[in-house]
Image (cartoon, grey):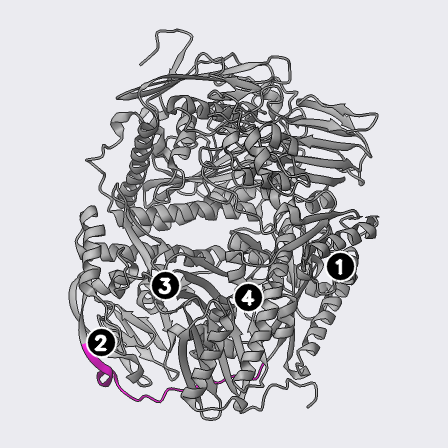
């Protein structure tokens, strides 16, 4: 399938074993009986939850224990994901260790570890994510893997927090751990651990967090072993194969129901890399024929100097689209079976989605989240609007300084955004990413020298539509310390998330110091080294998601409720939705609304600042 | 004796009333004649106090006892739970610190665990934004005032609420867990401006840090306040109608009883009243047979409640949920899953078998109930396999075996290519493993080995599954209570008065302030003593339990550790810290003994011992042969076998039954597997063990 274009590399799915021929067809299912399969699926889901619960309860950095930036998974002996967190991320976390450590040489009690994004082909896409893997044996037979990862607060590098918008080289973003063996047959390699901990600015947090991750994979190993003892290796393996095959079948069926044969294109854009390289375009092409589905992003722009390069794992598109297609079905789960969605995923080495070593990767979420939106755009084009509108990347601000006892502190505060409206519901208001949580104000004020003054919904940041895009938030923090340095990451102020199927685009985010005061200043959306001082008020406003469907089709009662609840201004209700409220604002003025809606503005499939057929 | 618990002559009869969704269970105990009478009546959801009265009247009529001989009435209610789940409470306003009007909307800015981000829809908040008001005034995390409370602003809000006719208000101000003065001032102003207002303060409901969780619990408390107050008053009227003058006590989620007066102050504490009563009942019945470490599973029609009893005491948690909402007050650690006798089985288009969480409920019910149910349920599977008799005891109710068989054949067996028996067994296997998964969470995940625990299955469907579940979880002994269907009501009779008082008192590692600890414990103990005074508990019947929540420096979750000894001394502190390391190791597989430990929240549990209740011994003297009433074909995995059927109430003390066997009684059916034997103890419990092989 190699392309004739020499600048294009063809990347078959990793391991080369997720092509069509390997997926059992409907009439030749594997042999696990339905009851065993159901029990195994329930068990691995429960084990995955237990592993995450252990990390949550024992980890030490706020980033993991409060913000909950971690993930556990259960994998087959071949490294296929069976049960993981329901989020659009790569499934191929285990096979990166196979090069250095072939499965046949692994031993019970081993634990493997890496954060090397390039070695992992983007399965881990920035360095702070430490990935641990424990093989599971029944007797001498390798039956599965338990895996956990978490985002570590600081692993060395140029600046506290390791990843900064200022980084232009991967080596500035902290220590690199190629696939190594952290434990050999139950014996932990303390030297390796000490070396890693010595590289952090917050060694005691790193020690505690590593301990939590180790305990988590060990717990997973024990629980999966018990499961294997109950069913035997062969029956467990058959059940795993069945679970994978079932997910393959359902996502492919649903994809075919949604998308007719044809060739489709969609382009989305990242504003900038913080170093003046923008705009940066992500261009996707999808070819659907009766027996093949091909994705091609090779026409995307080149990699950039700033750290927003996204080393996209080959499994990522199918995992994201598969998650959407599986939806609420409780009988299916998202697993490596979804990789069968796409027969081929083409990316070009040196492009924004496949940067060359050692391009900086730290802020890759900017591109990663925009790319997930681009897939929704592609599906929207292919399905005549039956996919959700766009969202923006979750926002982060870093505040570094010294507290009243002259101890260094680093607050990495994740701030929620709004998500795109869907063909059946509004977008999420004020969500960060999956089940990750915010820092309570009472936690922030107890640990860091700040007062959280305001934490509110950012009105009108959700794109208007039949279904409204989710709204972002406003967070205001007063500084109680001298000499604080601040990094900020806000995506999409110039090109906010688009609306779909007649819905309008979202509002943008921004970060402003001392709003309304004489010394007011707006920060660059992706920047570091911003100095702030005692008494300054830092205000961050985050963007929303795009709307879906014509805003005039939204029920006036919903619009009224949005106005009364502070999500939509009265002005936007009139201008965008054609809904006029009574003089006191407590009710809909039905007659004036009818008049306002008598003239229905024409719409096009997409909207960003104006309606467009598509984006280029 | 003045100040003593005035509720009884020791001869006073006890009545426990457990209101459930479909039935209200009543247990009556006459300590003089040692009569234990069990009764059931239909629940009356439109006015639950009606079913309460009907049940009491019924049991008094059955026993011929007059209301004046009743010494205590104990009640588990679902009023608060239903209000929360069905969102049927009154308009409730929330007052928060300026800048936090959207605290509920934003929450923890997450989607629900395990939810799919593409399909998840945020559930409506317990209070909408237009009913949230901000007031200026700030405290810092030490409780120091940063800005004074703007009383004029509070008054303006109060007047607006009064004008809108809102009478229920929750107040959550930042850092009120360490300084309640601002919240108390808000309450004063509200009460001055709105005479009949009901105010819930977060500093009283849950003085613990993390504002969103504290706010939600406070709101739920406010939300259920008016209805629970009215309900409690109505219950007292109903007792008067039955000529009962005895005191009424309510079961709290923590497994302790409380007076109606206390319940009106913190009504949210009754949200898990019924499940807590079940846990207490299981602990009691276990202890009566000499077992103090138990895993309990209460299987009803739509759900199963699973818990763990350690050393005779149900475990508490502060991480519970009611519906979509976190419930951060101490509640009995019970996990509920959608698995019960009415759980519906479905074959999926591509060969999967799903069981639950959808339930056929009481209506239309299982196919075999002939009430219009067409989808096969767990009960239908039991009937097809012979676990249930076609004619339930009492004879009034005949089950439709052919219809159940047809439903399983057409909807499960044929689509999946299985025999009817395989399909029925598959339905039960999936359900059993689902329950075992949760049993492992409450045991293994909490650091306990289920093999050391006795399994207590109860509820209408519990004894049908218990003997299979025990094999799956590896527990060696099963205790099946004498009346499995009404164990929760029995739990009401044997519980004690109980209240919890806690406060955050952060002690950084290496800087333990013994005086602050001692002062906080003293203050909490004073509150506890005042509560016991209020409940008229005599000095000899009082018990105070001290505990602290600890964590390693920089961790975010704490473990509750009993405070070693009653005093705050360096030795007691060391012992408590050591107990923390040990528990961390047991729960999480490792301890960090060189890492500093922090103390976060102190808690004092006040216990008022109620007069001990003695369970009457059974009077039946029959041997197994004498109790045998027939036989039944069981479709076991190894093939069909004829199994004897026993009438459980005819089995005398020490009667021994060998599996396979079916034991029937009014409120439950027990399935005994081959290789298991059951012995009847003096209280009528079946003690089931595996025959040593």
Q: Magenta stretch containing residue B612, yes or no?
A: yes
- Residue B645 is marked as 2
Q: Residue at x 56, y 53 (%)?
A: B326
> Which residue is under mark 3?
B301
Q: Quadrant of residue B458?
A: bottom left
- Estimate the x, y position of residue B246 in percent, counting from the top left: 58, 85
How far apart are labels 4 and 3 at the CA level? 21 Å
- Co-location on one chain, circles 2 and 1: yes
Of all chains, the one bearing label 2 is B
- Callout 4: residue from which chain? B
Q: Earlier in the sequence, mark 4 or mark 2?
A: 4
**Of marks 2 and 1, which one's residue comes earlier in the chain?**
1
Q: Earlier along the polypeptide chain: callout 3 or callout 2?
A: 3
Q: Left or right? Give the position of A412 relative to A117.
A: right
Q: Earlier in the sequence, mark 3 or mark 1?
A: 1
State the extent of the magenta-drawn residues as a range: B610-630
The residue that disc 4 covers is B253
- The span from disc 4 to disc 2 (Cα, nearest Å) is 38 Å
Q: Chain of mark 3?
A: B
Q: In which quadrant is the N terminus of chain B drawn?
A: bottom right
N-terminal of the two: label 4 or label 3?
Answer: 4
User: Same chain, marks 4 and 3?
Assistant: yes
Around disc 1, counting alpha carbons within 10 Å, would you say few (fewer than 14), some (14 to 19), or many (20 or more)? many
Q: Nearer the viewer, mark 1 or mark 4?
A: 1
| Circle 4: element type | loop
- Which of A177 and A66 lies nearest the eye of the viewer? A66
Residue at image mark 1: B190
């Amino acid at each position: 399938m190699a392309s004739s274009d020499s600048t294009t590399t063809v990347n078959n799915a990793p391991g080369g074993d997720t092509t069509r021929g390997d997926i059992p067809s409907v009439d030749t299912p594997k042999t696990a009986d339905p009851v065993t399969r159901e029990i195994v699926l329930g068990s691995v889901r429960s084990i995955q939850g237990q592993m995450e619960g252990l990390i949550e309860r024992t980890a030490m950095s706020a980033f993991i224990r409060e913000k909950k930036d971690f993930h556990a998974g259960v994998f087959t002996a071949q490294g296929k994901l069976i049960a993981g967190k329901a989020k659009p991320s790569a499934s191929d976390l285990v096979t990166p260790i196979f090069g250095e450590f072939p499965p046949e040489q692994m031993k019970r009690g081993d634990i493997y570890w890496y954060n090397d994004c390039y070695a992992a082909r983007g399965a881990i896409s920035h360095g702070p994510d430490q990935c641990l893997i424990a093989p599971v044996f029944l007797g001498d037979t390798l039956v599965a893997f338990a895996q956990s990862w978490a985002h570590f607060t600081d692993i060395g590098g140029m600046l506290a927090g390791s990843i900064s918008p200022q980084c232009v080289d991967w080596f500035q973003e902290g220590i690199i751990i190629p696939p190594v063996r952290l434990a050999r047959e139950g014996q932990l390699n303390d030297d390796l651990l000490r070396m890693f901990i010595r590289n952090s600015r917050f060694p005691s947090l790193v020690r505690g967090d590593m301990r939590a991750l180790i305990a988590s994979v060990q717990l997973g190993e024990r629980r999966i072993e018990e499961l294997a003892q109950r069913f035997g290796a062969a029956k467990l393996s058959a059940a795993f194969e069945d679970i994978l095959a079932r997910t393959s079948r359902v996502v492919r069926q649903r994809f075919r129901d949604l998308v007719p044969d044809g060739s489709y294109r969609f382009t989305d854009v990242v504003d900038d890399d913080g170093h003046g390289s923008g705009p940066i375009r992500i261009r996707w092409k999808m070819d659907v024929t009766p027996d093949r589905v091909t994705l091609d992003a090779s026409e995307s722009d080149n990699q950039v100097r700033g750290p927003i390069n996204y080393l996209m794992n080959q499994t990522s598109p199918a995992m994201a689209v598969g998650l959407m297609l599986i939806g609420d079905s409780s009988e299916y789960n998202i697993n490596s079976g979804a990789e069968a969605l796409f027969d081929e995923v083409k990316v070009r080495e040196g492009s924004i989605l496949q940067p060359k070593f050692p391009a900086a990767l730290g802020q890759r979420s900017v591109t990663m989240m925009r790319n997930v939106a681009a897939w929704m755009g592609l599906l929207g084009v292919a399905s005549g609007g039956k996919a959700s509108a766009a969202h923006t990347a979750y926002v982060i601000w870093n505040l570094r300084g010294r507290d009243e006892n002259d101890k260094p502190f680093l607050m990495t505060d994740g701030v929620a955004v709004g998500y795109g409206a869907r063909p059946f519901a509004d977008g999420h208001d004020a969500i960060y990413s999956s089940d990750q949580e915010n820092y309570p104000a009472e936690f922030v004020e107890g640990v860091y020298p700040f007062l959280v003054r305001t934490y509110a919904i950012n009105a009108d940041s959700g794109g208007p539509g039949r279904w409204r895009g989710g709204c972002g938030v406003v967070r205001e923090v007063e500084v109680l310390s001298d000499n604080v340095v601040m990094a900020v990451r806000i995506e999409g102020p110039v090109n906010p998330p688009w609306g779909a199927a007649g819905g309008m685009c979202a509002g943008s985010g921004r970060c402003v110091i001392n709003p309304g005061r004489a010394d007011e200043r707006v920060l660059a959306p992706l920047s570091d080294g911003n100095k702030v001082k005692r008494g300054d008020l830092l205000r961050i406003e985050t963007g929303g998601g795009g709307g879906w469907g014509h805003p005039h089709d939204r029920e006036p009662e919903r619009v009224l409720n949005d106005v009364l609840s502070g999500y939509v201004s009265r002005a936007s209700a009139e201008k965008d939705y054609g809904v006029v409220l009574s003089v006191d604002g407590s009710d809909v003025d039905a007659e004036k609304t009818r008049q306002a809606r008598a003239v229905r503005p024409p719409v096009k499939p997409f909207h960003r600042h104006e309606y467009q057929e598509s984006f280029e | 004796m003045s100040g003593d618990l005035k509720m009884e002559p020791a001869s006073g009869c006890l009545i426990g009333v457990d209101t459930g969704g479909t039935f209200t269970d009543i247990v009556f105990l006459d300590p003089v004649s040692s009569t234990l009478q069990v009764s059931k009546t239909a629940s009356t959801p439109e006015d639950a106090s009606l079913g309460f009265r009907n049940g009491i009247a019924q049991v008094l009529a059955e026993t011929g006892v007059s209301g004046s001989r009743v010494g205590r009435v104990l009640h588990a209610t679902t009023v608060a739970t239903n209000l929360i789940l069905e969102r049927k409470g009154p308009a409730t306003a929330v007052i928060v610190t300026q800048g936090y009007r959207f605290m509920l909307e934003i929450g923890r800015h997450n989607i629900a665990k395990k939810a799919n981000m593409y399909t998840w829809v945020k559930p409506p908040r317990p209070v909408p934004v237009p009913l949230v008001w901000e007031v200026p005034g700030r405290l810092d995390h030490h409780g120091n005032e940063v800005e004074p409370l703007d009383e004029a602003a509070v008054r303006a809000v109060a007047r607006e609420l009064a004008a809108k006719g809102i009478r229920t208000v929750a107040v959550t101000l930042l850092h009120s867990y360490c300084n309640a003065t601002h919240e108390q001032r808000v309450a004063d102003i509200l009460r001055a401006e709105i005479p009949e207002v009901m105010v819930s303060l977060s500093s009283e409901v849950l003085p613990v840090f993390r504002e969103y969780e504290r706010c939600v619990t406070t709101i739920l408390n406010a939300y259920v306040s008016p209805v629970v107050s009215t309900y409690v008053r109505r219950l007292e009227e109903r007792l008067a109608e039955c000529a009962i003058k005895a005191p009424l006590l309510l079961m709290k989620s923590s497994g302790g009883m409380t007076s109606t007066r206390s319940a009106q102050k913190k009504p949210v504490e009754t949200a898990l009243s019924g499940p807590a009563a079940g846990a207490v009942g299981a602990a009691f019945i276990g202890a009566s047979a000499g077992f103090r470490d138990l895993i309990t599973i209460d299987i009803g029609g739509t759900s199963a409640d699973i818990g763990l009893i350690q050393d005779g005491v149900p475990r508490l948690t502060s991480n519970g949920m009611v519906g979509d909402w976190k419930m951060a007050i101490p509640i009995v650690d019970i996990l509920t899953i959608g698995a019960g006798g009415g759980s519906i089985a479905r074959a999926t288009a591509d060969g999967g078998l799903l069981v639950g969480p959808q339930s056929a409920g009481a209506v239309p019910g299982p196919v075999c109930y002939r009430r219009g149910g067409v989808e096969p349920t767990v009960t239908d599977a039991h009937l097809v396999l012979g676990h249930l008799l076609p004619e339930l005891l009492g004879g009034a109710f005949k089950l439709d075996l052919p219809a159940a068989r047809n439903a399983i054949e057409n909807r499960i067996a044929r689509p999946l290519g299985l025999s009817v028996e395989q399909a029925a067994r598959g339905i039960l296997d999936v359900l059993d493993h689902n329950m075992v998964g949760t049993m492992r969470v409450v045991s293994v995940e909490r650091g306990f080995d289920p093999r050391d625990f006795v399994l207590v299955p109860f509820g209408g469907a519990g004894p049908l599954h218990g003997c299979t579940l025990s094999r799956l979880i590896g527990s060696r002994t099963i205790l099946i209570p004498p009346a499995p269907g009404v164990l929760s009501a029995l739990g009401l009779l044997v519980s004690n008065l109980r209240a919890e008082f806690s406060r955050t008192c952060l002690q950084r590692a290496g800087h333990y302030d013994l005086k602050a600890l001692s002062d906080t414990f003293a203050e909490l103990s004073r509150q506890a003593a005042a509560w016991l005074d209020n409940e008229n508990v005599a000095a000899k019947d009082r018990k105070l339990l001290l505990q602290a929540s600890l964590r390693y420096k920089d961790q975010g979750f704490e473990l509750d550790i009993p405070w070693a000894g009653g005093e705050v001394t360096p030795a007691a502190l060391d012992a408590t810290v050591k107990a923390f390391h040990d528990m961390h190791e047991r729960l999480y597989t490792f301890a960090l003994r060189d890492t500093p430990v922090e103390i976060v929240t102190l808690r004092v549990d006040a216990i008022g011992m109620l007069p001990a209740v003695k369970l009457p011994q059974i009077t039946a003297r029959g041997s197994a042969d004498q109790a045998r009433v027939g036989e039944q074909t069981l479709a076991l995995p190894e093939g069909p076998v004829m199994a004897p059927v026993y009438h459980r109430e005819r089995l005398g003390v020490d009667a021994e039954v060998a599996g396979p066997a079916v034991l029937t009684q009014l409120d439950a059916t027990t399935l005994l597997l081959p290789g298991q034997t059951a012995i009847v103890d003096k209280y009528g419990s079946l003690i089931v063990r595996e025959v040593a092989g």
